[in-house]
Amino acid sequence: MLVDKAEFEAWMERIMGELYRISRKQDKAEAREKHLNYLNGERLYDNQEVCQLLRINKRTLQRYRNNGVLKFYTIYHKTYYKESDLHEFIRNNFDENEVKRQAREDRLSETFPIPKEGTESEETPL
């Protein structure tokens, strides 16, 4: 199979474009990984990450800090939490049954999404 010069150059240009796109994705992934904070080899979480992880709001997180229930570190006026401290907090303060119940609710909500308000769902007779 013979390929003329113009077709070859078009193919090479497409291949180089794909390689460039893949390279940019890899660079973004590496930058995201560098953005993660570590202290002595242990991952640090900020307020927003902890709130999302524990499914609590910022005020509840602040109450945990004020009551001394959750250890935290302040570095350059920003609050961080060590991963091991979060694991310990979860083990000590969250009931295993509550965690299982929440996981079941998550699976159910993915399988049977709750309709948003304002939308009417059609009911089918059984």
Image: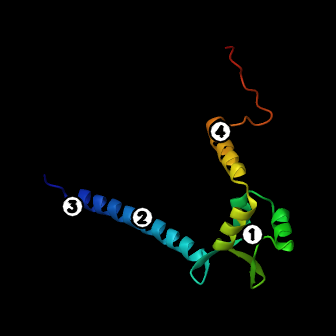
Q: Is residue 27 left or right of residue 12?
A: right
Q: Earlier in the sequence, mark 4 or mark 1?
A: 1
Q: Earlier in the sequence, mark 1 or mark 2?
A: 2
Q: Earlier in the sequence, mark 4 or mark 2?
A: 2
Residue holding disc 1: 47
The vertical placement of 4 against 82, above or below, is: above
Query: Mark 3 to mark 2: distance in Å?
Result: 26 Å
Secondary structure at numbered mark 1: helix
Q: Which residue is found at the position 83% from the left and 63% from the top?
A: 60
Q: Which numbered disc, 3 or 2, marks the residue closer to the eye?
A: 2
Residue holding disc 3: 5
Asked if disc 4 and disc 3 are in contact, CB closer than 8 Å, the reply is no
Q: Which mark is residue 108?
A: 4
Point out the image quarter for the C terminus: top right
Q: Quadrant of residue 52?
A: bottom right
Residue holding disc 2: 22
Q: Is residue 82 left or right of residue 30?
A: right
Q: Earlier in the sequence, mark 4 or mark 3?
A: 3
